[in-house]
């Protein structure tokens, strides 16, 4: 008999919870332990506390088994990556590096930064040659496709150094939208970090991925960008990662990234 999926009892006449137990699968606590959620005992406590969902069903029974290749598991609402062959890496792309794994013109490319990894990684979107900062690389094709799809509107934040001192009213102008040659551009957020009589440092967040949109946006307003650094991609932050360095995304930030695109 399959272990019972403990949930709040349905109302009279309601539909009982769907049985997600796979008798040929792996015990759920072992799956979670393999995914980095601690010892099996710790994972049993997570399950018993009602923090785990399998295919949309909350599971609290410790005997439930799942197929790691098919099951969709969430802990505290965040997707758990069960396929240990998949990896997502954050890179602080330096200036002068093209966003390709193998540049036909022989320019510095991304391959050098992940040459020590066995996985075949692909970059998620691009940063211009003269833009530095956070770039994601992954071998998870579904995740990459969703992160780049306009439907999911993943926000990206940049620090931009601008020529000239921006006026106090520039935020209102940006909020109203700026018309570019390929349509209206409206940042999600904007703030002035610092400014002098000759230049300004501003932070801007956009969910759009149009080519060179940050540079074109401020150029249109009369404040050319002299330096551009991407500091976040969705919930993933650049932090203290040095130029040319990489790090594998942690469990929580990967789960948040996946949740943000409906995985």
Image: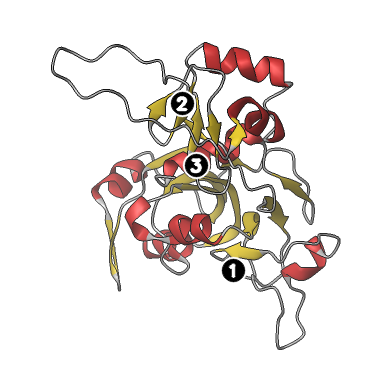
Residue 222, located in which quarter of the rendered image? bottom left
Residue denoted by label 2:
2
- Sequence-wise, the earlier of marks 2 and 1 is 2
Q: CA distance from mark 2 to mark 1?
A: 54 Å
Residue, far front: 1
Q: Residues within 10 Å of mark 1 (few under 14, many from 20)?
A: some
Whole-number angstrom distance, CA of label 3 to CA of label 2: 16 Å
Judge the density around disc 2: few (<14), some (14-19), many (≥20) Cα neighbours within 10 Å: few
Q: Secondary structure at mark 1?
A: loop
**Tag nearer the camera, 3 or 2:** 2
Residue 255 location in percent, x, y? 54, 37
Image check: 75 left or right of 170? right
Secondary structure at numbered mark 3:
loop
Is 7 displayed left or right of 86 in the figure? left
Is residue 233 visible in the rendered structure shown here? yes
Q: Nearer the viewer, mark 2 or mark 1?
A: 2
Residue under pointer 3: 71
N-term mark: 3 or 2: 2
């Amino acid at each position: 008999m399959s272990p019972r999926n403990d949930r709040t009892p349905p109302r009279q006449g309601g539909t009982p919870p769907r049985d997600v137990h796979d008798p040929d699968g792996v015990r759920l606590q072992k799956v979670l332990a393999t995914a980095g959620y601690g010892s099996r005992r710790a994972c049993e406590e997570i399950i018993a506390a009602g923090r785990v969902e399998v295919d949309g069903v909350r599971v609290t029974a410790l005997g439930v088994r799942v197929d790691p290749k098919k099951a969709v598991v969430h802990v505290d609402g965040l997707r758990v990556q069960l396929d240990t062959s998949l990896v997502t890496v954050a890179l602080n792309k330096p200036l002068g590096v093209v966003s390709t794994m193998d540049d036909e013109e022989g320019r510095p490319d991304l391959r050098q930064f992940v040459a020590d990894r066995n996985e075949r990684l692909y970059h998620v979107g691009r940063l211009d040659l003269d833009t530095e900062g956070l770039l994601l690389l992954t071998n998870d094709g579904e995740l990459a496709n969703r992160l780049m799809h306009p439907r999911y509107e993943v926000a990206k934040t940049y620090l931009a150094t601008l020529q000239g001192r921006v006026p106090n009213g520039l935020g209102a102008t940006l909020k109203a939208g700026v018309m570019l040659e390929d349509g209206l551009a409206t940042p999600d957020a904007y703030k002035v970090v610092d400014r002098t009589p000759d230049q300004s440092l501003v932070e801007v967040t956009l969910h759009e991925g149009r080519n060179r949109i940050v540079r074109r946006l401020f150029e249109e307003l009369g404040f050319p960008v002299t330096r551009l650094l991407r500091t976040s991609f969705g919930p993933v932050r650049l932090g203290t990662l040095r130029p040319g360095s990489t790090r594998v995304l942690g469990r929580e930030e990967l789960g948040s990234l996946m949740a943000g695109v409906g995985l």
